[in-house]
């Protein structure tokens, strides 16, 4: 009786190796793509957190502030400790500052422009008692034009409008508070 060799031919072995290499390349490409996407998502998350903490700082300070002087790109005011404070946009370096410290992480967030608007109601005879006895700013609106930076994808534009109604319903009360505390 003769025995037949049950082995793979060279061509079959080469085809299996090529299919195995092809599968490894596809899996590696998928892994690289998922890693890049995760890194991009992580950097966007850091950028959004930086924006959120900066906007919260601005909100907190302006909500409790008074005696506002508003221009197109800055706000000068008294903070809750009755000290002079300033929020200003440096258009050359594209940074927003609160008392000379940057509010956003410049590695992940680029601030293209900031527009600041203030509403100070006029004291006309038809105005209510509330407005006649308070000359303070009632509403501050800030428009932010951001770019979220990422080394993997292109910069993503982001527009945010923040509205703040300061707690300065009676300027006299706040001024008196600062004198006696």
Image: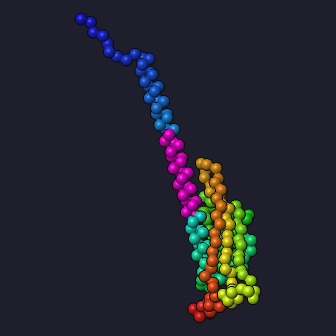
Q: Is residue 22 placed above or below 78 in the rendered structure?
A: above
The quarter of the picture where the N terminus appears is top left
Residue at position x 65%, y 83% in the image: 66
> In the image shown, does 146 or 167 lie closer to the viewer?
167
Give the percent coordinates (x, y) of residue 78.
65, 82
The quarter of the picture where the C terminus appears is bottom right
Residue 79 visible in this rendered orientation of the protein: no
Residue 162 visible in this rendered orientation of the protein: yes
- Tell me where residue 131 sits by quadrant: bottom right
Q: Is residue 95 placed above or below 138 in the rendered structure?
A: above
> In the image shown, does 92 or 160 lie closer to the viewer?
160
> In the image shown, does 62 or 29 lie closer to the viewer?
62
- Tell me where residue 132 sits by quadrant: bottom right
Q: How would you classify the magenta stretch by its main secondary structure?
A: helix
Please report the bounds of the magenta region as a residue range.
30-50
- Tell me where residue 99 sits by quadrant: bottom right
- Left or right relative to 92: residue 39: left
- Residue situated furthest bottom in the rendering: 180
């Amino acid at each position: 009786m003769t025995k037949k060799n049950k082995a793979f031919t060279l061509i079959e072995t080469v085809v299996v190796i090529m299919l195995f290499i092809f599968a490894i390349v596809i899996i590696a490409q998928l892994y690289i793509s998922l890693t890049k996407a995760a890194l991009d998502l992580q950097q966007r998350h850091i950028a959004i957190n930086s924006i959120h903490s900066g906007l919260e700082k601005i909100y907190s300070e302006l909500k409790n502030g008074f005696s506002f002087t508003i221009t197109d790109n800055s706000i000068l005011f008294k903070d809750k400790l009755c000290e002079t404070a300033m929020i200003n946009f440096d258009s050359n370096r594209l940074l927003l500052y609160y008392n000379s410290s940057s509010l956003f992480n410049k590695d992940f967030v680029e601030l293209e422009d900031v527009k600041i608007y203030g509403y100070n109601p006029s004291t006309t005879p038809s105005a209510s008692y509330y407005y006649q006895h308070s000359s303070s700013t009632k509403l501050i609106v800030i428009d932010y034009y951001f770019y979220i930076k990422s080394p993997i994808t292109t910069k993503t534009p982001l527009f945010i409008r923040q509205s703040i109604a300061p707690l300065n319903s009676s300027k006299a009360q706040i001024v008196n508070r600062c004198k006696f505390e």
